[in-house]
Image: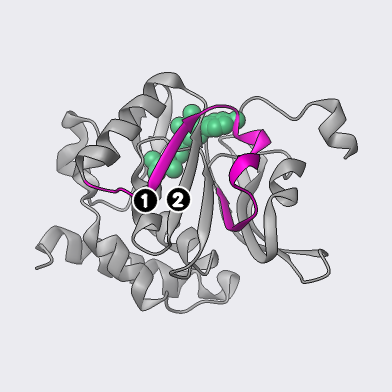
Amino acid sequence: MVSPKVREMLATIEAETRLTSRQTGRSALRERVMEALAKVPREEFVPGPMRPFAYADNALPIGLGQTISQPFIVALMTDLLEPEKDHRVLEIGTGSGYQAAVLSQLVRKVYSVEVIPELAEQASRRLQRLGYRNVEVRLGDGNHGWPEHAPFEGVMVTAAAPLVPPALKKQLASRGRLVIPIGLPYLHQELMVLEKDEAGNISTREVLGVAFVPLVGGVDPAERRG
Ligand code: SAH
């Protein structure tokens, strides 16, 4: 059974989807994406004092200067990834682990990289406790992706970057999709969807203006040349 608070969150996501449909080209999100949102208990992913607001359509602080994204944005980014049951997905920016939990309902395996040790550890423990067995969290700089498990059918970056980290493009499977906010940290980014075709060529499209915390760290010069 879906609680009234969750139902309200889903209704708000549907309304926001319609309101932004001119930009995004989507007037409704996939049924299975909405079902995944309905199933994951968002209150488990926010700090105690934030629990009363867990199902509001807002980003919320999760400590250490970071935030759990707004449910509509989680839903939209998940939909843009076009997740399928047999996919393996890489997420950069585990944060609370909420987005990873949503993805875990939709794909075979989620690999998630977080750069802040406390958050990586908390999220990993939380996901274990809640029984999300197909999510693996690693501490590290997501600019380098997770080469040992590449290629990925989907890559999602949940922090703002000035450009698409080259390693992530490289680790994208043929016909894979990469969803990432590109632009100025905190202020304004364009949510971008990159798609790799069978020949390895990448096409890019802008979807919507968004605001994320920054992707820290960076690519080293050798990787930039490659
Ligand atoms: N997806 C998260 C919210 C992301 S907030 C959720 O569902 O809760 C952005 C996260 O990206 C923060 O936790 C931040 O520490 C992390 N981050 C920033 N730069 C990073 C990098 N280079 N590699 C990995 N994680 C990074």
Residue 191 sits in quarter: bottom right
Task: Classify 80 as above or below 26.
Answer: above
Residue 142 lies within the magenta run = yes
In the picture of the structure, the residue carrying the numbered disc 1 is 134
Q: Quadrant of the N terminus?
A: bottom left
Give coordinates of residue 23: x percent, y percent: 59, 70
Q: Residue furthest front?
A: 148
Q: Residue at x 42, y 78 (%)?
A: 28
Residue closer to the observer: 180 or 83? 83
Give coordinates of residue 200: x percent, y percent: 81, 64
Q: Residue at x 60, y 28 (%)?
A: 141
Q: Secondary structure at mark 2?
A: strand
Task: Classify 38 as above or below 145.
Answer: below
The mark that comes first in sequence, 2 or 1, is 2
Residue 70 seen by the camera: yes
In the picture of the structure, the residue carrying the numbered disc 2 is 110
Residue 204 lies within the magenta run = no
Task: Classify 1 as above or below 172.
Answer: below
Q: Quadrant of the C terminus?
A: top right
Asked if the residue under mark 1 is in contact with the one under mark 2, i.e. CB atoms within 8 Å, the reply is yes
How far apart, in angstroms, are the residues tagged by discs 2 and 1?
A: 6 Å
In the image, the segment drawn in magenta is: 131-156
Residue 47 sits in quarter: top left
**Which kind of residue does numbered mark 1 sit on?**
Asn
Residue 82 in the figure: left or right of residue 146: left
Q: Secondary structure at mark 1?
A: loop
Residue 48 in the figure: left or right of residue 33: left
**Which kind of residue does numbered mark 2 sit on?**
Val
Give coordinates of residue 107: x percent, y percent: 43, 62
**Around disc 1, counting alpha carbons within 10 Å, would you say few (fewer than 14), some (14 to 19), or many (20 or more)?**
some
Residue 14 in the figure: left or right of residue 206: left
